[in-house]
């Protein structure tokens, strides 16, 4: 499931495109069936800020032979994976290049390490890619920073779309260290990593990746 720039990286745009392609329709044909101008359909497929009305969703769903729920991603406020599998799911192994394309934009991932006295732990963090390295910010939690001295640390990034029963997961493994050198600190601060959790989080960690693996589930039926 390689990254697709024609959808602007949005799930909604990707759902429209995938449903349209499954129906064998061009953008012009879809727009005509839905009573929309083609330029507006292009906007819906590519803009990260599109906010169609319910009437537009109904017309699009009818034109594509699908449901409003399938297009809008209804149910995304519940834990993923509660819906059934696709009719003909395909589990594919991703190449390192495909994995890197999927995670290139940064976002939220999970740093995986072993905490003394507890065992494996996963902590969600906001991250950015810096070349092949993963960089993230933390609040200087000793559990995490002490554990980074381990020989190997992993980082997981994944994405699930219940409406399409599709998803992917990328696992990176390497060695991690807190960034302390002044010039490097200036550089990682410029990456624009903004933790969703807020608060004072001035500790930057760099994971030097040695291995990348990934899998994707695609719906083909």
Image (tube, rainbow, N blue to C red):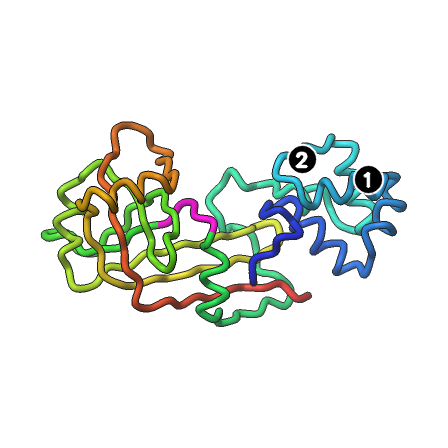
Q: Residues within 10 Å of mark 2 (few under 14, many from 20)?
A: some
Which region is colored magenta? 105-109
* Residue at position x 86%, y 50% in the image: 28
- Residue 103, above or below 143: below
In the image, residue 106 lies in the stretch drawn in magenta: yes
Q: In the picture, which quadrant includes the N terminus? A: bottom right
Assess whether mark 1 and mark 2 are in contact (beta carbons under 8 angstroms).
Answer: no
For the point 36% across and 42% down, the residue is 126
Place of residue 13 in the rendered image (x, y in percent of width and height, measured from the top left): 66, 46
**Label 1 environment density (alpha carbons within 10 Å; few <14, some 14–19, many ≥20):** some
Numbered circle sitting on residue 59: 1
Nearer the observer: mark 2 or 1; the answer is 2
Question: Does residue 12 appear to the left or right of 154 in the view shown?
Answer: right
Q: Secondary structure at mark 1?
A: helix
Secondary structure type for disc 2: loop
Q: Position of residue 104 (x, y in %)?
A: 46, 54
| Residue 49 image label | none
Give the image quarter of residue 56: top right
Prevailing secondary structure class for the magenta stretch in the rendered image: strand
| Residue to which mark 2 is pinned | 50
Q: Residue furthest top?
A: 199
In the image as oriented, which residue stretches furthest toward the front? Answer: 183
Who's the residue at 37% across and 60% down the image? 132
Q: Nearer the viewer, residue 164 or 34?
A: 34
Q: Nearer the viewer, residue 121 or 196?
A: 196
Looking at the image, tell me whether mark 2 or mark 1 is earlier in sequence order: 2
Answer left or right for 196 relative to 167. left
- Answer whether residue 82 is magenta in the image: no
Closest to the observer, 149 or 25: 149
**Nearer to us in this view, 60 or 184:** 184
Q: Which residue is drawn at the image coordinates 68% and 65% (left, top)?
A: 221
Residue 94 rendering spot, x and y as whole percentages: 48, 69
């Amino acid at each position: 499931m390689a990254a697709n720039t024609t959808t602007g990286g949005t799930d909604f745009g990707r759902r429209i495109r995938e449903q349209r392609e499954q129906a064998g329709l061009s953008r012009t044909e879809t727009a005509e069936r839905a009573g929309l101008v083609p330029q507006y359909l292009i906007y819906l497929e590519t803009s990260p800020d599109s906010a169609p009305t319910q009437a537009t969703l109904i017309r699009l769903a009818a034109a594509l032979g699908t449901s409003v729920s399938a297009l809008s991603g209804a149910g995304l406020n519940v834990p993923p994976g509660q819906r059934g599998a696709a009719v003909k799911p395909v589990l594919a192994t991703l190449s390192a290049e495909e994995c890197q394309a999927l995670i290139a934009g940064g976002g939220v991932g999970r740093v995986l390490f072993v905490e003394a006295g507890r065992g494996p732990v996963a902590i969600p963090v906001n991250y950015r890619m810096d070349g092949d390295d993963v960089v993230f910010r933390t609040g200087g939690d000793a559990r995490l920073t002490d554990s980074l001295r381990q020989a190997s640390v992993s980082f997981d990034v994944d994405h699930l779309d219940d409406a399409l029963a599709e998803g992917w997961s990328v696992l990176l493994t390497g060695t991690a260290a807190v960034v302390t050198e002044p010039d490097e600190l200036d550089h990682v601060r410029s990456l624009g990593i903004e933790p969703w959790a807020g608060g004072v989080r001035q500790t930057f960690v760099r994971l030097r990746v040695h291995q990348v693996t990934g899998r994707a589930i695609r719906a083909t039926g």
